[in-house]
Image (cartoon, rainbow, N blue to C red):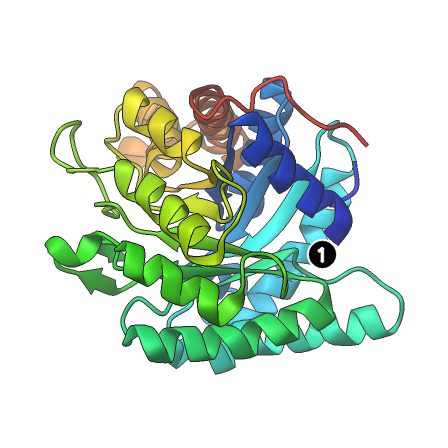
Amino acid sequence: MPIVTPEKYAEMLDAAKAGQYAFPAINVSSSQTLNAALKGFADAGSDGIIQVSTGGAEYLSGPSVKDMVTGSVAFAAFAREVAKNYPVNIALHTDHCPKDKLDGFVRPLLAISEERVARGEEPLFQSHMWDGSAVPLEENLKIAEELLERCVKAKVILEIEVGVVGGEEDGVENAINEKLYSTPADAIATAKALGYGDRGYYMTALTFGNVHGVYKPGNVKLRPEVLKEAQEAVVAEFGLEPGSKPFHLVFHGGSGSTPEEIAAAVDYGVVKMNVDTDTQYAFTRPIADHMFKNYDGVLKIDGEVGNKKAYDPRAWGKAAEAGMAARVVEACENLRSAGRSLGA
């Protein structure tokens, strides 16, 4: 199917919140990882989200070019072509963007989408993330207000982060401490600044102990009840329907999370869960296996010629894509989106 329209994307996220499931948002940095993500979603019968980080966008532009906008535009164009051949809905998203990269990443991409929409076309990306976790909440939400206004005009969904995700991703590192837990006051301040869907569609990454990186189960102290308390606080503050979930929530830093923690987060309104570390390993592990098993083929040892079929990038690339696709299927199953594609 074609990359989703803004209306279809909103339908996907609303259906996920109502049906208590979430979409894996798979980070990619190449055509191979993009193809692996697409195959994984198709194999699972799940709609999904494919995203690029600032580092991934730089890499996509060429290691010597390192231009985030060029890489993002190229990624979106390629994804639009290859996604047509898969029977599921796919949305394109840009991941964590800190304040110092807004002018070189999100704002230029929004300008491109504004121009496309003015011509009667679809936006380039379906959603963008502003990561204001490193600045004071008041400044975070002030920037979010400006971006939400532009996103509405560009028919793009904004994702924000309120709170801090620990660990390291793309050079942004945060300590693991009590700042990893968003408060009900944070949630109320967010709703006061951005509304609860009445002023524009946005997603909120409230933090509940999330940590980027690789951790064994039990090492990350998640408290999904933080999300429940945040939803309830906004309902009470604004007199919304009891039991409703005003926020479309996002789960960052999920490596090492237990199935029970993931399920609880989804029950409390998570509709998108970022998956990167686990799929990176799932892609690389089959390559390592191939190289070890075909050592004398991939290397020209002692003046020999090696084996072209062994060192052809397609040989190990297919194995890598299959490994990553299988991990995407697992993510869809954990988040209950498998078999629930909305179709065209």
Which of the two residues, 134 or 136, is positioned nearer the viewer here? 136
Q: Secondary structure at mark 1?
A: helix
* Residue at position x 69%, y 51% in the image: 78
- Quadrant placement of the N terminus: top right
* Residue at position x 70%, y 41% in the image: 11
Q: Which residue is mark 1?
A: 77
121 sits to left or right of 8: right
Which of the two residues, 271 or 304, is positioned nearer the viewer here? 271
The tally of labels here is: 1
Which of the two residues, 241 or 134, is positioned nearer the viewer here? 241
63 sits to left or right of 292: right
Rendered image quadrant of residue 132: bottom left
Q: Position of residue 343 (x, y in %)?
A: 77, 28
Is residue 78 something one can see in this rendering? yes
**Alpha-carbon neighbours of circle 1 within 10 Å: few (<14), some, or many (≥20)?**
few
Q: Position of residue 310 (x, y in %)?
A: 46, 26
81 sits to left or right of 139: right
Q: Position of residue 119 (x, y in %)?
A: 88, 72
Is residue 54 something one can see in this rendering? no
Q: Position of residue 53 (x, y in %)?
A: 45, 58
* Residue at position x 62%, y 75% in the image: 149
Tag 1: residue type?
A: Ala
* Residue at position x 44%, y 79% in the image: 142
